[in-house]
Image (tube, rainbow, N blue to C red):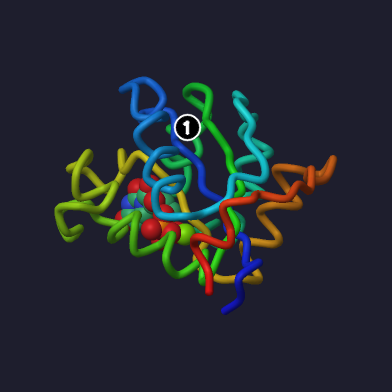
Amino acid sequence: MSVSERTYIMVKPDGVQRGLVGDIISRFERRGFKLIALKFVHASPEHLEKHYADLKGKPFFPGLIKYMASGPVVGMVWQGLDAVKTGRVMLGATNPLASAPGTIRGDFALAVGRNICHGSDSVDNAEKEIQLWFPEGIVQYTNDNEKWIFE
Ligand code: UDP
Ligand code: MG
């Protein structure tokens, strides 16, 4: 856990279609995380297969790739204290029916195969996903509000 921990958060095609991009960005901004990268992209199946390589072989894998390639996504990198674990808490459980109200999936989704948003599940995977989606690198900048968020 560190103040400069980074996580990869991605609004999935259903989240874009349903107009939830602003709400999801807003939740991370208001929590105190720093936006350090953002990209609107219609990803290829090949690219998405790399992103979800760990799940290859699962029965839902072909449907997952089709869903994720069905429209543009919004990929983001958020930085801040315990960003990976806190991002997962803000996301809710993989199955929206098990997600508490107040979480992104608990507020906006019902079906596991249409669960609105992705979040990295470990610091190692976050760094891999950031490299995959932002191979060009990330712009560094100082945010003056950090002194109001951290001691
Ligand atoms: N998924 C699915 N059916 C399942 C499990 C997962 O369609 O039974 C989809 C779902 O969209 C999920 C994604 O595959 O978000 C990746 O699965 P993972 O286990 O990594 O869940 P996550 O990390 O997104 O909570
Ligand atoms: Mg996952």
Question: Is residue 98 shown above or below 141?
Answer: below
Q: Position of residue 137 (x, y in %)?
A: 82, 45
Identify the residue shown where x is 44% and y is 35%: 12
Q: Position of residue 108 (x, y in %)?
A: 22, 39
Q: Is residue 98 left or right of residue 140?
A: left
Picture quadrant of residue 24: top left
Picture quadrant of residue 6: bottom right
Q: Is residue 131 left or right of residue 147?
A: right
Q: Amino acid at mark 1?
A: Lys
Identify the residue shown where x is 67% and y is 41%: 37
* Front-lying residue, 107 or 93: 107
Which structural element holds mark 1?
Answer: helix
Q: Position of residue 75 (x, y in %)?
A: 58, 38
Location of mark 1 (residue) = 66
Identify the residue shown where x is 28% and y is 61%: 93
Q: Is residue 66 left or right of residue 2?
A: left
Can the viewer see residue 48 in this picture?
yes
Seen as rendered, the residue at the extreme right is 136
